[in-house]
Image (cartoon, grey):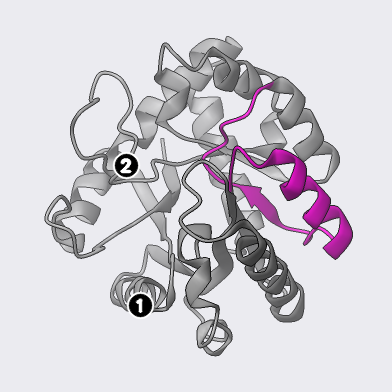
Amino acid sequence: MRWIDDHCHLGDGTDRWPEAEATIADAHEAGVMRMITVGCDLVSSKLAIEVASAFDDVWATAGVHPHDASGGIEGIAELLADPNVVAVGECGLDYHYDNSPREVQREVFVQQIALAHDYDLALVVHTREAWEDTFAILESEGVPSRTVIHCFTGGPEEAQKCLELGAWLSFSGIVTFPGAPEVLSAAILCPLDRLLVETDSPFLAPVPHRGKPNRPALVPVVGAAIAAAKGIDIEDVANVTWKNAAMVYRLP
């Protein structure tokens, strides 16, 4: 089986995270042959591109997370022409922490949707406790043709709305959490041709690895949980998520 971790944070500079080379080798041993490392601001976006440039099986995104929206998006557009960049983001709205004012989050989200349109790139969306405004902005600005709702945290109702908008749903280790049955229900509802899997590492390690730094090598744990919930073979989840990611991010 071949897996792709369509959302991770490699080499983010924290002491929780091992060197990218060792992490990627660990992933390969687990059958995770491709990774997309994600930018959250200008500095981490540049780092993501550096990592992607160093490894044939890693690609990058460039964008501004809602937590960092107060800093604006200056410099992000200049990164999007890099051949290693496959998406704008992660961007969106986070009303749980409100690390940036909501009005600023919305403005910066709109600006990055425009960049995805202008550069014909995928859009990676982070939304937490902000579904209504997320949907309203996507509808008003026009949903990019390749839009991913990363680390999906809603239930079936939100999943259905995302699917109606044409988005892909990317599920993380949250599908293994006993306290998040609605997320697993959304994964069951999600058609295979709209399904992606991720770790969001070093965060959100799946059961039974809770309390430890997450890593791309654990993507198969996420896939196994989804396969069991859907009553299908894990190989089917690996195959469809590999194909979906290749299409969404235009990977070779």
Residue 7's place in the image compared with 230, above or below, is below
Q: Which residue is mark 1?
A: 43
Q: Quadrant of the C terminus?
A: bottom right
In the image, is 98 to the left or to the right of 201?
A: right
Question: Which residues are the magenta region?
Answer: 127-155
Q: Residue at x 52, y 21 (%)?
A: 226
Residue 149 lies within the magenta run: yes
In the image, is 166 to the left or to the right of 177?
A: right
Which image quarter: residue 60?
bottom left
Q: Residue at x 32, y 42 (%)?
A: 203
Q: Residue at x 69, y 71 (%)?
A: 116
Secondary structure under badge 2?
A: loop
Q: Is residue 63 visible?
A: no
Q: Quadrant of the N terminus?
A: top left
Dot 2 amino acid type: Phe
Percent position of residue 14, x then y: 18, 59
Q: Which residue is mark 2?
A: 203
Q: Which mark is residue 159?
A: none
- Distance between the Cα atoms at labels 1 and 2? 19 Å
Dot 1 amino acid type: Val
Residue 233 lies within the magenta run: no
Q: Which is more N-terminal, label 2 or label 1? A: 1
Q: Is residue 133 visible?
A: yes
Question: Mark 2, residues whose alpha carbon is within 10 Å: few (<14), some, or many (≥20)?
Answer: some
Percent position of residue 89, x then y: 55, 64
